[in-house]
Amino acid sequence: MSRLLSRPVLLALTALLSAVAVLRFGVLPTILVMMVGVTSAVLVGRHRAGRFTVRPRARRGQEWRPTVQHAELPTPADDPAIGYPEPSVEQFAARTPPLAHLKLEGGLRTALDGFALGRAKRIVEAPDLLSHAAADAESWPVVELAVQKTLELARGRGVGIQAEGQVGLQKALALSAARGVLLAEWRQLEDGKTVWDGPVARIRASDAFTIQRVSEATERQQLPDLFAGIARRPQDFEVRLLLPYALTTAFYLRLQGNPPNAFAA
């Protein structure tokens, strides 16, 4: 068909139809026929020369494909093992880049952070995470213990907690802790049972980047509920640090357990 509708054929057909139109319909219809014919001939010529393409229409009901932001990037070629001691709340006060003391090469840091962004997004957007953690006999005690340790830390630093907002505050801490548990279980599923050097757990460098990304997202989401339960904020302590502390404490505590059964119902 494309060979039959070449530029010379279209021009000849346009001339023939124009003659018929001028004899039977007058000048205006003839001009319209000539315009359509000449335009078609030009487009066909450009198409045959490769300068013009016709895109097929997308089928309705086409399946949604995730964007780059929704898809987790592949595991970095180099994701070195690092030591992770029991977390301290002071480690989050400086807001320094993850693993700044290791002097990692710039390309490796970029790869690790890119991977962490995808993983953090999946953790933060996990549906009903707190409900699932509450129904897990192994995960929920870790969440409860992390929340308890965080509240003890808050009271020890002079933070006053008011009864009216205590439920929201505890829920915010529990959600942060549940995200830490999920990250720890993810690490255990990939590497197996955690290797320990005394009190120091062996994790991956990408986990440190993921912890920062999840902590940043959790602060943006949960700070209103956290502050709603605070009656007194001491001048020498940032209340926002309670969220990353709950997350990393739960992460650290969950690493002490056995890897989760990924095939459990």
Image (cartoon, rainbow, N blue to C red):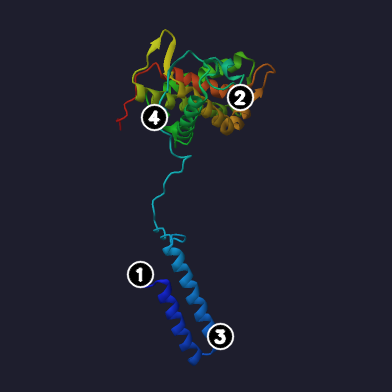
- For mark 2, give the secondary structure: helix
Nearest to viewer (mark 3 / mark 1): 1
- For mark 3, give the secondary structure: helix
Percent across and percent down for residue 93 are: 61, 19
Q: Please rate how many residues cluster around mark 4, counting C-alpha atoms within 10 Å: few if below 14, some from 14 to 19, many from 20.
A: few
Camera-nearest residue between 234 and 106: 106
**Is residue 254 depicted above or below 61 in this figure?**
above
Nearest to viewer (mark 1 / mark 4): 1
Q: Residue at x 35, y 25 (%)?
A: 190
Whichever of callouts 1 and 4 sits on the residue coming sooner in the sequence is 1
Task: Inspect the image, locate mark 2, and give the three-letter code of the amino acid beneath it.
Answer: Arg
Task: Inspect the image, locate mark 3, and give the three-letter code of the amino acid beneath it.
Answer: Leu
Q: Residue at x 39, y 23 (%)?
A: 187
Percent across and percent down for residue 252 are: 45, 17
| Residue that carries the numbered disc 4 in the rendered image | 135
| Residue that carries the numbered disc 2 in the rendered image | 240
Camera-nearest residue between 148 and 45: 45
Tag on residue 3?
1
Task: Inspect the image, locate mark 4, and give the three-letter code of the amino acid beneath it.
Answer: Ala
